[in-house]
């Protein structure tokens, strides 16, 4: 089998392709066909003719591509429309389907990255274009006409667009914002469909660029289930985004709580319609879950312990939580900003009840060479490393240098439920920190809790690619580096009621301006009364 190879620019031009076209194998060992972008970048197509490779030149073989490999209307080897092609290669060379998909899939994946750069990275927010040729070509056509919303619709809803590609009226109405619930995907469960049908005037234009439509819909549907019965559902894109942000904040902040308690907390917080209704009340919590985690683990639970209650019930914890932070998510978000502003003072005092170091999960790792979606094919990133942050000094240094509150995760690390790493790039002889990530283990698999760059900004493609490789290695169960899964709690200093009270009082007073009005007014006594 002739392995896939890229054509040189001259050969591309001769066949009507822009640079970057790829020759793919056929059941004939010396015969190939070509897939690429047209010279004017207006469409993606495969050659009708097949070619023999003679001295690095392509000579017409007198054979039609369709007769050799079947229809070629996709650039993703995993799509059903490429099934005939895969089967014919398997039969001709007596190899497994997985081998064919690996051999042919990699160059097609690189070609899709080229298409992504042509269509526009900013437009796609880093996501690759769908693998269906008709979808790519329709998007390119709309972009050439300046119809950005139409192009986004095709790239984010390929299944919908495939169904209605020949009915432009429905496409136009969808872009204009008409309801689409009669077109709900069949895979959605009844509860999701029921919630989403309550939303009037929903449009595909609500879906943020770069977010898979199914993910958006499922998240929005789940968020709506926590609204009170009969409450108004979001009426525009901004309100839907606010509701999704509220849902994501609660998911992150209360991940460690029992499911029934999570539901109670969410329903109580979502009952405040003013939190998300209207343009002036748009909700964006940023990293408020750090604030919530800190209050829950470092104030609430310790207040119960100081009162001699080591296993408070769900109802007790829910009541105390709302008493400490308040019952409105908008207020929580504002309190979070105040808490972040005071973070250096809050973290300055060393708490003797929390160990200053813990068992390492990894040693420093050199990430293998890789490419990102925005890079040229000949470029590779070779100087990225992942460093563990396994003591409070390293966490504090990382947080100060990166202007974020990773130090607030110290207690979770010491208790064995979380680990933190720093992703850095070696430039000449110095390491530059790109981002910070934390992760946890659940049912044997690794999950990323959060990943942030300088000042809580979104991580770069380089950071995301490196962290994705790290996660894949561990979840593949055979990582190429040492990974310790035993995160037993670090050894604590013997605790007395006096030093627990002193440490809790110190933490409370430093956080007091960022707590509820009830706590600000009542002080430490009010805290203990709330957790009695």
Image: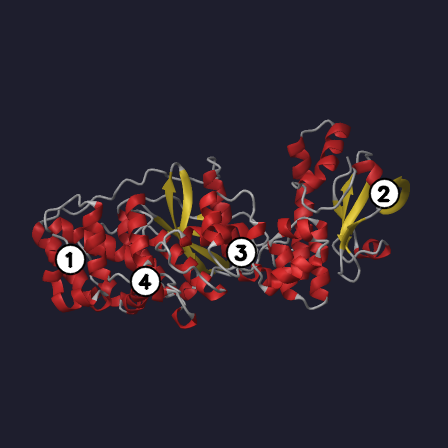
**Could you say where residue 470 lies in the image, as x and y percent from the top left?**
47, 46
Camera-near label (4 vs 3) is 4
Camera-near label (2 vs 3) is 3
Q: Earlier in the sequence, mark 1 or mark 4?
A: 4
What secondary structure is marked by label 3?
A: loop
Q: Is residue 126 left or right of residue 192?
A: right
Cβ atoms under marks 1 and 3 closer than 8 Å: no
Give the answer, above or below, for where 361 lies relative to 527. Answer: above
What secondary structure is marked by label 1?
A: helix
Mark 2, residue position: 50
Q: Earlier in the sequence, mark 2 or mark 3?
A: 2
C-alpha span from label 4 to label 3: 27 Å
Q: Earlier in the sequence, mark 1 or mark 3?
A: 3
Mark 4, residue position: 272
Cβ atoms under marks 2 and 1 closer than 8 Å: no
Q: Is residue 366 visible?
A: no
What secondary structure is marked by label 2?
A: strand
Disc ID at residue 128: none
Q: Is residue 446 visible?
A: yes
Q: Earlier in the sequence, mark 4 or mark 3?
A: 3
Q: Assess disc 3: are there few (<14), some (14-19) or many (≥20) residues with their C-alpha within 10 Å of its C-alpha.
A: some
C-alpha span from label 1 to label 3: 42 Å
Q: Earlier in the sequence, mark 2 or mark 1?
A: 2
Mark 1, residue position: 504
**Could you say where residue 158 lies in the image, as x and y percent from the top left?**
63, 51
Compare residues 29 and 160 and report the one nearer the observer.
160
Camera-near label (1 vs 3) is 3
**Residue 118: which quarter of the image?**
bottom right
C-alpha span from label 2 to label 4: 64 Å
Mark 3, residue position: 211
């Amino acid at each position: 089998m002739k392995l896939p190879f890229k054509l040189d620019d001259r050969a591309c031009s001769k066949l009507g392709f822009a640079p970057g076209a790829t020759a793919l194998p056929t059941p004939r060992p010396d015969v190939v066909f070509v897939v690429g972008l047209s010279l004017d970048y207006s469409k993606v197509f495969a050659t009708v003719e097949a070619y023999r490779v003679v001295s690095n030149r392509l000579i017409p073989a007198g054979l039609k591509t369709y007769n050799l490999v079947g229809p070629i209307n996709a650039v993703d080897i995993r799509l059903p429309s490429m099934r005939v092609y895969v089967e014919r290669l398997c039969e001709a060379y007596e190899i497994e389907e997985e081998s064919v998909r690996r051999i042919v899939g990699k160059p097609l994946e690189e070609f899709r990255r080229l298409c992504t750069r042509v269509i526009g990275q900013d437009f796609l927010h880093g996501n690759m274009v769908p693998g269906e040729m008709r979808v790519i070509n329709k998007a390119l056509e709309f972009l050439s006409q300046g119809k950005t919303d139409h192009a986004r619709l095709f790239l984010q809803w390929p299944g919908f667009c495939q169904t209605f590609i020949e009915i432009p009226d429905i496409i136009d109405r969808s872009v204009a914002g008409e309801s689409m619930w009669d077109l709900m995907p069949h895979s959605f469960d009844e509860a999701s469909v029921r919630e989403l049908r309550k939303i009037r005037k929903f449009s595909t234009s609500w879906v943020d660029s770069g977010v898979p439509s199914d993910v958006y819909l499922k998240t929005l549907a789940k968020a709506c289930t926590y609204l009170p019965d009969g409450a108004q559902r979001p009426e525009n894109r901004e309100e839907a985004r606010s509701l999704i942000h509220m849902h994501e904040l609660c998911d992150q902040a209360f991940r460690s709580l029992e499911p029934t308690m999570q539901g109670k907390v969410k329903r109580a917080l979502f009952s405040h319609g003013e939190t998300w209704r209207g343009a002036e009340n748009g909700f964006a919590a940023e990293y408020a879950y750090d604030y919530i985690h800190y209050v829950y683990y470092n104030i609430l639970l310790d207040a119960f312990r100081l009162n001699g209650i080591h296993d408070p019930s769900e109802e007790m914890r829910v009541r105390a939580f709302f008493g400490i932070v308040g019952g409105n998510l908008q207020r929580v978000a504002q309190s979070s900003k105040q808490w972040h502003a005071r973070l250096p003072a809050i973290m300055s005092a060393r708490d003797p009840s929390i160990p200053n170091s813990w068992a390492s999960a990894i040693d420093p790792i050199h990430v293998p060479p890789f490419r990102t979606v925005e890079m040229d094919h000949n470029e590779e990133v070779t100087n990225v490393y992942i460093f563990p942050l396994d003591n409070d000094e390293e966490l504090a240094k990382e947080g100060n240098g990166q202007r974020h509150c990773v130090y607030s995760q110290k207690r979770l690390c010491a208790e064995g439920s979380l680990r933190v790493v720093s992703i850095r790039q070696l430039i000449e002889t110095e390491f530059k920190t790109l981002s910070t990530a934390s992760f946890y283990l659940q049912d044997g698999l690794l999950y990323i809790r959060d990943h942030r760059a300088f000042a809580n900004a979104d991580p770069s493609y380089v950071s995301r690619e490196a962290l994705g490789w790290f996660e894949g290695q561990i979840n593949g169960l055979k990582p190429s580096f040492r990974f310790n899964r035993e995160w037993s709690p670090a050894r604590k200093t013997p605790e007395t009621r006096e030093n627990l009270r002193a440490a809790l009082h110190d933490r409370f007073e430093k956080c007091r301006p960022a707590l509820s009005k009830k706590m600000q007014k009542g002080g430490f006594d009010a805290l203990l009364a709330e957790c009695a």
